[in-house]
Image (cartoon, rainbow, N blue to C red):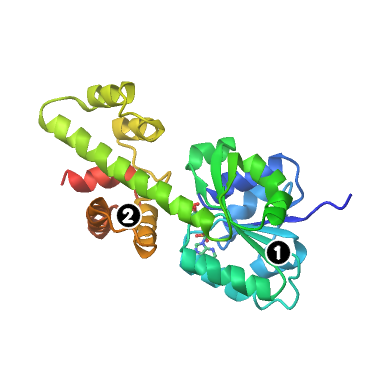
Amino acid sequence: MHHKKIGWIGLGNMGFPMAKNLENAGFPLSVFNRTASKSEPFTARSEVYISAIELVKNCDIIFTMVSNDAAIIDLYADIFRLEDITEKIFVDMSTISKELTLTIAQQLKEKQARFIDAPVAGSTVPAKEGKLIIMAGGEEKDLQEVLPYLQKLGKSVKHLGPVGQGIAAKLAINYFLSIIYQGLAETVLFAEQSGIKRDDMLAIINESASGSGATQVKTPLLLQQDYSAAFALDLMLKDINLAKKEGVNSPLSKVLIETYQQAHDAGFGKQDVIGIINYLKQ
Ligand code: NA7
């Protein structure tokens, strides 16, 4: 049987552990990252490329997990220079705009290539454990071809419709998360203002119906005051702005955009998203 050659572009906080899971599963893997040093831990078992274009040439299925629209635009500017990409499947797992998703998919189609948007819910811990939730948009037969790989990255893969619908679902779930994180930070600060210790309040939240996986994940960070990014505040700001672009126009959305933007402007953008608390308590 012909083994498909799998390419992975983007070895950031999310892409690195995800690519490692594919490597550990034994798939023939090729990797590329703009900053070459991040590819170093792959040299023993995978093929490391120093150009995205060379990787794409040599692979059948190409995953991308990069920051934002600008990164995807850069990468595809290179990829579209390739003469023949017929039948290749491109799977973008980044969170980018729906508009760009549809544009890239269309341009690939014109070159007889295929596209799936497959952004994820879950940050670095579920990424390491292969327990992400994957929201996919695209043709069913294309999704079937990439399913064996997606199943090594996630605990569930949901096919939500044509290209763009994965991103649509992702923007909705992250909108909810942005509410939870700002709500959690505001609640903890309110309780502290009334003399309730942070660890007591977090224990109450997590034992109560208001607790969730999201509050539990951020609890140790809030207690240890460790704000190194599992999911950077700037990435959340990007996602709420993408949701706005997609038409979210609720009362809360306006407040969220304003608060996360101000937290970014005040210099908290590189912290974890729960670092919103540091902005709010100023
Ligand atoms: P990170 O940890 O900020 O990683 C971003 C990755 O994107 C990293 O590999 C970057 O390469 C890469 N990148 C950024 N800009 C470019 C350009 N212009 N060209 C090529 N590669 C680029 O983000 P996460 O892993 O947390 O998140 C990834 C996505 O999942 C994001 O959409 C989230 O919202 C969800 P570098 O190492 O900086 O050279």
| Residue hosting label 2 | 269
| Residue situated furthest right in the rendering | 1
Q: In this image, 231 relative to 184: left or right?
A: right
Give the amino acid at mark 2. Gly
Q: Label 1, on which residue?
A: 55
Residue at disc 1, secondary structure: helix
Taking depth in this image into account, of 54 and 36 the one nearest to the observer is 54
Q: Residue visible at 59% across and 39% down?
A: 156
- At a point 39% along the width and 61% down the height, the residue shown is 242
Q: Residue furthest left?
A: 194
Determine which of the numbered discs, if any, sits on residue 5 in the image.
none
Q: Which residue is nearer to you in this view: 261 or 167?
A: 167
x then y, percent, for residue 52: 65, 66
Task: Examine the image and state in which quarter residue 85 appears.
Answer: bottom right
Query: The residue tagged with tag 2: helix, strand or loop?
Result: loop
Q: Residue at x 34, y 31 (%)?
A: 219
Q: x, y percentage for residue 107?
A: 62, 74
Label 2, residues with CA under 10 Å away: few <14, some 14-19, many ≥20: many
> Of the residues shown, which amino acid type is indicated by label 1?
Leu
Residue neighbourhood size for the residue with mark 1, other residues' Cα within 10 Å, grouped as few (<14), some (14–19), many (≥20): many
Mark earlier in primary sequence (2, 1): 1
Please indicate, yes or no, whether residue 43 appears anywhere in the rendered image.
no
Does the beta carbon at disc 1 come under 8 Å from ligand 1?
no
- Residue shown at the point (28%, 52%) measured from the top left: 268
Is residue 128 in sight in this rendering?
A: yes
Q: Quadrant of residue 141?
A: bottom right
